[in-house]
């Protein structure tokens, strides 16, 4: 059912014309004035920042499927209800649960010393007491994949690939391949375990975790990330002599653990059945307190919605805030939402999510129907004084709403400056103090402005050019 609805809704105009060449659509002066007022109020907003402070302090880490994630859902329901949202609810679903119980990686010979390491999410356990073996180093995943079995069999693989620091996070996709594929590539050639240089960009002994198997709770082999300085140390040791390491990873697994999406709304007026969705994910990795990933995103969308809630009148369309569950371990919340609401996607007029930390927004991408591109220009013009550059009609939506974008729901992606994001992402250092309040509030301003305009104008962001009598454009 879901798939059929989707095909009918596909936006065909995306990519068709440069947005920058469009003339902006006219915006009602009253709506424009209100949007500008929201931006000013966002600059001193306390609600959004307090939401992420309280969430990361009172709940802390929120590993998908854990008691802590359940506590975060309960906490959010109470908070969002107290803030005055309508229809606050949890849409539950089940996920395979994985958790670390114990992890230790150490050089055994020639000079015994611990390495700072963290098991990757979904890593298989080692036998009790761990495994010990000689290290074989590869400069890249591709090198491991090309290596003969004889080079790997019975050894502990070490992939020493670094990650490039970029503003848009484009270095991540490349670097993360070794995280998801090392265990399989290594184990299939008889390796005892896999170590990777931590996927991250900071020089500290802060290993980065993250999922290595998206389709289930347990992957094919034991795999851990060692911090950058520890990867350097291991490389220097290997330059001098053969090195033996021990890897001990113990895990806990449950096939059917509870998770859920938390949903809260500002019910619209005459267009209440039409939905403007703004989202984030509530779960986090277990090492830090999930402040940048993605407590900040939740604070941004909640803060933005609350500014709109405080207006004298509700906007015409319903604003739906979705705090997705179980994003980190395989986008389970996104899939559950699409399943639950698949029959109603034509009523989703716009969707957006914040899931890239709290750095300032520097560009504004859309994915609208071709005849709706003037609306994109109007939104971009309004956001330019906040330092936001107009960008093209090629937004993919992000991890949790990507599934909606692929189903034809128009999306906007406010692009944050993520230059420092991977210094903290998935590490013990992802904590509340890393959020810069002024940059965070600039995000709240952007979300408040475009969400309000989308909800109040009634604009059709799917809009396609009208067909002439021959049925062609
Ligand atoms: Zn995230």
Image (cartoon, rainbow, N blue to C red):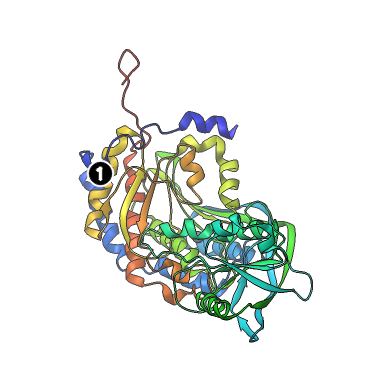
| Residue 120 visible to the viewer | yes
Q: Is residue 369 above or below residue 209?
A: above
288 and 378: which one is in front?
Answer: 288
- In the image, is 86 to the left or to the right of 191? left
Image quarter in which the N terminus is found: top right
Q: Mark 1: give few (<14), some (14-19) or many (20+) Cα within 10 Å.
A: many
- In the image, is 47 to the left or to the right of 109? left
Q: Quadrant of residue 178?
A: bottom right
Residue identified by numbered label 1: 377
Q: Is residue 304 above or below residue 267?
A: below
- In the image, is 60 to the left or to the right of 25? right
Q: Position of residue 326 (x, y in %)?
A: 60, 57
Q: Position of residue 451 (x, y in %)?
A: 36, 50
Point 20% across, 46% down: residue: 29
| Residue 328 visible to the viewer | no
Point 61% across, 72% down: residue: 118
- In the image, is 90 to the left or to the right of 153? left
Q: Position of residue 135 (x, y in %)?
A: 64, 72
428 and 109: which one is in front?
Answer: 109
Q: Quadrant of residue 218?
A: bottom right
Q: Secondary structure at mark 1?
A: helix
């Amino acid at each position: 059912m879901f798939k059929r609805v989707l095909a009918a809704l596909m936006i065909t105009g995306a990519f068709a014309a440069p947005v920058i060449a469009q003339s902006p659509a006219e915006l009602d002066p009253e709506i424009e004035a209100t949007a500008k007022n929201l931006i000013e109020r966002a600059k001193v907003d306390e609600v959004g920042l307090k939401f992420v402070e309280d969430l990361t302090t009172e709940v802390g880490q929120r590993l998908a499927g854990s008691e802590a994630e359940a506590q975060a859902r309960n906490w959010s329901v109470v908070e969002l209800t107290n803030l005055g949202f309508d229809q606050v609810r949890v849409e539950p679903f089940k996920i395979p649960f994985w958790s670390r119980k114990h992890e230790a990686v150490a050089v055994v010979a020639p000079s015994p010393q611990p390495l700072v390491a963290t098991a990757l999410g979904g890593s298989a356990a080692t036998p009790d007491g761990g495994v010990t073996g000689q290290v074989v180093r590869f400069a890249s995943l591709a090198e491991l994949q090309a290596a003969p079995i004889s080079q790997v069999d019975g050894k502990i693989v070490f992939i020493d690939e670094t990650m490039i620091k970029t503003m848009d996070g484009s270095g991540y996709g490349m670097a993360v391949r070794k995280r998801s594929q090392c265990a399989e590539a290594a184990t299939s050639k008889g390796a005892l375990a896999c170590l990777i240089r931590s996927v991250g960009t900071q020089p500290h002994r802060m290993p980065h975790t993250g999922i290595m198997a998206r389709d289930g709770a347990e992957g094919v082999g034991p795999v851990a990330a060692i911090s950058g300085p520890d990867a350097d140390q291991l490389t220097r040791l290997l330059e001098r002599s053969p090195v033996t390491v021990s890897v001990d990873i113990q895990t806990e697994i449950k096939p059917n653990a509870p998770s859920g999406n938390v949903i809260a709304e500002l019910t619209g007026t005459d267009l209440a059945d039409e939905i403007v969705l703004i989202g984030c994910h509530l779960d986090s990795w277990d090492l830090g307190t999930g402040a940048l990933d993605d407590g900040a995103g939740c604070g941004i969308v909640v803060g933005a919605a609350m500014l709109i809630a405080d207006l004298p009148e509700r906007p015409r369309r319903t604003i739906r805030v979705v705090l997705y569950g179980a994003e980190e371990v395989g986008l389970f919340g996104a899939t559950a939402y699409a399943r639950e609401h698949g029959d109603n996607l034509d009523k989703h007029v716009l969707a957006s999510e914040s899931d890239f930390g709290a750095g300032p927004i520097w560009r504004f991408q859309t994915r609208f129907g071709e005849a709706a591109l003037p609306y994109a220009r109007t939104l971009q013009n309004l956001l330019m004084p906040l330092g936001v550059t107009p960008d093209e009609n090629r937004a993919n939506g992000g991890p949790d709403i990507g599934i909606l974008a692929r189903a034809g729901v128009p999306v906007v992606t406010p692009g944050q400056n993520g230059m420092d994001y991977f210094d903290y992402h998935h590490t013990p250092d992802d904590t509340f103090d890393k959020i810069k309040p002024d940059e965070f509030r600039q995000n709240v301003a952007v979300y408040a402005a475009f969400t309000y305009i989308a909800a109040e104008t009634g604009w059709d962001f799917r809009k396609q050019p009208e067909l002439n009598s021959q049925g062609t454009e």
